[in-house]
Image (cartoon, coloured by chain):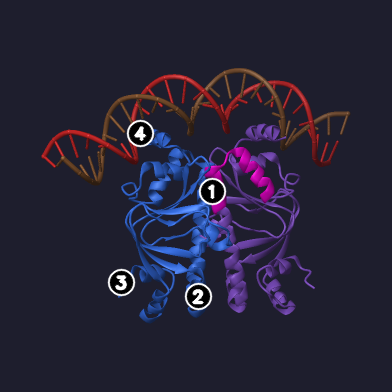
Chain colours: A purple, B blue, C brown, D red
Amino acid sequence: MITHPLHKHLSKEIDLSKEEFDIILEYFTPLSFKKKSLVITSNQYVSDQYFVLKGCLRTYLLDTSAKEHTLQFAIENWWSSDYISYYTGVKSILNVECIEDTDLLKVKKEDLEQLLLRIPKLEHFFRKQLESAFVSFQKRILSNLNNTAEERYTTFLTRYPNIEQRVKNYQIASYLGITPESLSRIRKQVK
Amino acid sequence: MITHPLHKHLSKEIDLSKEEFDIILEYFTPLSFKKKSLVITSNQYVSDQYFVLKGCLRTYLLDTSAKEHTLQFAIENWWSSDYISYYTGVKSILNVECIEDTDLLKVKKEDLEQLLLRIPKLEHFFRKQLESAFVSFQKRILSNLNNTAEERYTTFLTRYPNIEQRVKNYQIASYLGITPESLSRIRKQVK
DNA sequence: CGTCTATTTGAATGTACTCAAAAGCGGTGG
DNA sequence: CCACCGCTTTTGAGTACATTCAAATAGACG
C-alpha cells in the first residue's frame, strides 16, 4: 500500500518498490514555509526544484513597472522551480511565493542527476514529466493566440480545479495577461 | 571529421562515433517536400517527428474562423512535429507546412524509443532537447505577458535570425499574435 | 470593530482590430 | 523584356475592446 504522496505521484508513470522509494526519499529535504514567504527570488542561481506536499505556490515575473506576471501555480503533487535558471544556469528572473502555508520536498539538481543514474526508471519519469510540461505550455501559447480572455479564464478554471478559493483574482488576472478590472468584468459576464 | 548535419547537431550534446551515428541514421527516413506542401495536417494521429536538413517549416493552428496562429518555425537543424499529438496520443490540431522546398529526416516515435534503449546517450540528448524546448516556450509565455508587440517582434528577429527573407510578414504576425496590419505599422515604427 | 486588502464599478483614454482600398512585389506567359 | 495577375504589404478611417485612473464596495483578519 502506497501512502507517501511523492511515491503515489511517481507511481503514475513507473513502478517503485518500497525500498527503491526509500532511497529516493533520502535525496529530498522537507521544508515548510509560511504563507507569503518566497521560496525562490530573482537574481539567484537556482539549483533546486520542489515537489508540493501541501499548500500552493505561485511563480511570477516582476517587471520594470513592478507589475506581476504569473507564469504558473503549483498545488499538491506539482513541481515547481525557476526552470529557466535551473536548466540553463542563468540567474533567476522569477519569484516563487507561497500563497498558503506550504510543505515542500526540495531536491538539488546535482543530487537528482546522481539519483537518475542510480535509479534509471526515474529518468523515464522525469522525461515524461518534461514532455507533459512542454505540452501544457504549448497549449497555453496556442490558447493565448487563439482564445479570448473569457475563454482562457474558463479554461483556467478547469485546468486548476477548485483553485478560485485558494488564489486571488488579481493573481489569476496576471496569469491570463489581463488587468484585475478586466477579469472582474469577465466574471460578471460569465455568471 | 563530422559532416552529416544530424551528426553535427547531436554532437553539441553527446559524443558519437561514426559507427554509432550510422546506426542512428538507419532509423531516419529522408523525405523531400515541395514548397507549400503539408507535412502534418490536423485531425491525424501523429507518430513521427522531423529533423530539418534544408528548408523551413511552419507549425500553425487553424481556428474556427479560418485564421492561422503560428506556433513555431523550424529551419535547418531544428526539430518539428505536432508534439501535442505526438506526446499525448490525441489527434493533431496543428498543421505543419513547408515554407520552402524542404528536406527532412523523419523518425517514428516507436523506432526512436527503441533507439534510445539501444544508444542510451541519445536519451540524454533528447532530454536536453526537451529541456531547452520547455525553457524557450516558458520564455515565450513570459514575453507575451510582459512585452509589447514591438518588443516581441524585435525579440523574434534575434531568435530567428535572417528569417525575415524566408517568411511572410503575415506569418510572423500570426506568431506574435497580432494582425498583419499591426505588424506593418510596428515595422514602420522600428525603422 | 476597525483597518487593510481585494474586488467591483464607472468614465475617459488608448491601443489594436476590422474593413476597404491602394500600392508594392514576384512570378508567368506572351 | 514587358505586361499582367495574384498575393502581400501598406495605409487610412472607423470601431471595439482592454486599459488606466479614481472611487466605492466588499471581505478578511487581528
Mark 3 Cα shell of 10 Å, populated few (<14), some (14-19), many (≥20) = few
Task: Please give the residue where the numbered disc 3 appears in the rendered image.
Answer: B3
Q: Relative to A160, is A66 on the left or the right?
A: left
Q: Residue at x 38, y 49 (%)?
A: B158
Mark 2 Cα shell of 10 Å, populated few (<14), some (14-19), many (≥20) = some
**Whole-percent x, y for residue A125 in the image:** 62, 69
Does the magenta portion include A140? yes
Q: Which stretch is magenta? A: A138-159
Q: Relative to A161, is B85 on the left or the right?
A: left
Which type of secondary structure does the marked residue at label 1 adopt?
A: helix
Mark 1 Cα shell of 10 Å, populated few (<14), some (14-19), many (≥20) = many
**Whole-percent x, y for residue A90 in the image:** 50, 57
Q: Name the N-terminal-most of marks 2 and 4.
A: 2
Whole-Å distance between the Cαs marked 3 and 4?
Answer: 42 Å
Tags 3 and 2 both on a single chain: yes
Whole-Å distance between the Cαs marked 2 and 1?
Answer: 29 Å
Whole-Å distance between the Cαs marked 1 and 3?
Answer: 36 Å
Given contact means CB atoms under 8 Å apart, are the residues at marks 2 and 4 in contact? Answer: no
Chain ID at mark 2:
B
Which type of secondary structure does the marked residue at label 3 adopt?
A: loop
Asked which quadrant contains residue A102, the reply is bottom right
Q: Is residue B132 above or below residue B152?
A: below
Whole-Å distance between the Cαs marked 4 and 1?
Answer: 27 Å
On residue B116, the disc is 2
Given contact means CB atoms under 8 Å apart, are the residues at marks 4 and 1 in contact? Answer: no
